[in-house]
Image (cartoon, helix red, strand yellow):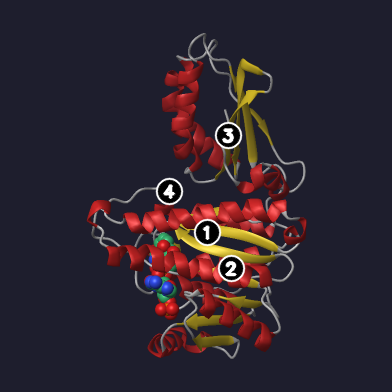
Amino acid sequence: MHSSNALPDLSGHRVAVPGGTGAVGEGIVRSYLAAGADVVVPTRTQERAEEFRHVLGDAATDRLHLVVHDYTTFSGAEQLAEEMERRLGGVDDVVAPIGGWWAGKRIWEIDESDWHSAFVGLATAHMAVLRAFLPRLNTRGAYTLIVGESASTPVPGSGLVSMEQAALLMMRQVLGAEVSADTELKEQQRVFALVLGPVRTRLAVSGDPDWVSSDQVGAVAVAASAAPSLSGRVIRLRSQAEVDEALALFHGTQPVGTGAVVAVSTMEPQNGQREDLVKLLSELAPRIRAEPGCLHYSVHRSRGDADGPLLVIQMFASVEAFTRHSSVVAAEIPRISALLAAPPAPPALFEPLFQSSTLTEGIGNGETTLSS
Ligand SMILES: NC(=O)c1ccc[n+]([C@@H]2O[C@H](COP(=O)([O-])OP(=O)(O)OC[C@H]3O[C@@H](n4cnc5c(N)ncnc54)[C@H](OP(=O)(O)O)[C@@H]3O)[C@@H](O)[C@H]2O)c1
């Protein structure tokens, strides 16, 4: 059931959703239509167009522009972007839920045809759409990539999906660096990646209430479009709690004192144990970063004092998320303590003085890093 009540008003926004006919795309298209935007959905076949119009039913208003066009090549995507500019006068946002699931072979069993369809074809489609649309986005427009958690968690038998999705995440990271290095572009584009766990869609019905629905993915994408002051970042949407956190971040609804928590601690390695301590902290990093509500985890050494203490900075979306994290890492404390010169002190906790979104931007632009 889709609720448009909580959606911000995007009347007048022109949004392209290549891949919008798919299972996740449907919720995204519905959300933008419900928010009042003009939505361009290209699809490669007439049959798919007709099926999708039928799926949308009454939601397919005259603001839905369903176009039969191959947008998956460089020239095809370019033509689509030009046509959208010509007909609608510009492009404000793009959401790209292009591609689906692939499984069945281990990496060494993959043949050339699998490689081209599940990796090269999808990567080319994303690249084509991005290079055609990103430079055309209007001021502070949002370009939102949709990827699966398999981008960072290996799924045996579906390596092609994992590899292609990981490439998309890196594409976002590179774009983030390129956009912030270019003052002119910084005024224009924000690049997001929504990282999804299993999604409740018209094709996958689940009784698990924690599954995120395609409408909720759409609601978060809409919220990103409607929050131009928030810079691009990776947003994980693998549970209802993470959807709530993402919406709170975009809507700026986190009151000071109940929003993000920054935890800072120092660790003095025992003589001769520095390397092992760094190794252990870096092994823990992916697990901590994957915890619900973790916005940042990094480890630093002192400038000019390679033997000095290590500084650990963590940021969680809420006190509850930080408390959950503390109980998860409690089991690791003995291993960490064994490498320290003195027992670890509880981290010092800080909360945002300004709105939490500003603080998140200040720390590594929403990315998480381990520097030691
Ligand atoms: N479904 C889930 O539970 C789930 C979970 C986590 C992540 N995701 C991610 O969400 C994105 C969309 O997934 P989905 O489940 O919505 O997929 P889907 O139902 O297969 O839809 C994907 C859409 O992408 C378009 N497309 C363009 N080039 C394609 C190609 N070479 N192969 C296949 N499709 C192509 C198709 O649109 P046209 O044919 O109309 O052009 C299709 O409707 C993917 O990145 C996926 O990894 C999905």
* Circle 4: residue type: Ser
Q: CB of mark 1 within 8 Å of CB of mark 2?
A: no
Residue at left offset 55%, top offset 37%: 322
What separation in Å lies between label 3 and label 4 (alpha carbons)? 18 Å
**Label ID, residue 152:** 4
What separation in Å lies between label 1 and label 2 (alpha carbons)? 19 Å
Quadrant in which residue 348 is drawn = top right
User: Which quadrant of the figure contains the C terminus?
Assistant: top right
**Label ID, residue 298:** 3
Question: Which sits earlier in the primary sequence, circle 1 or circle 3?
Answer: 1
**Label ID, residue 96:** none
Label 1 belongs to which residue?
194
Asked whether the viewer can see residue 61, the reply is: yes
Label 2 belongs to which residue?
131
Circle 1: element type: strand
* Circle 1: residue type: Leu
Question: Which sits earlier in the primary sequence, circle 4 or circle 2?
Answer: 2
Counting other residues with Cα less than 10 Å from the Cα at mark 4, is it few (<14), some (14-19), or many (20 or more)?
some
Circle 4: element type: loop
Cβ of mark 3 under 8 A from ligand 1: no
* Circle 3: residue type: Ser
Q: Nearer the viewer, mark 4 or mark 1?
A: 4
Question: Which sits earlier in the primary sequence, circle 4 or circle 1?
Answer: 4
Q: CB of mark 3 within 8 Å of CB of mark 2?
A: no
What separation in Å lies between label 3 and label 2 (alpha carbons)? 32 Å
What separation in Å lies between label 4 and label 2 (alpha carbons)? 24 Å
Question: Which sits earlier in the primary sequence, circle 3 or circle 2?
Answer: 2
x%, y% of residue 11? 69, 79
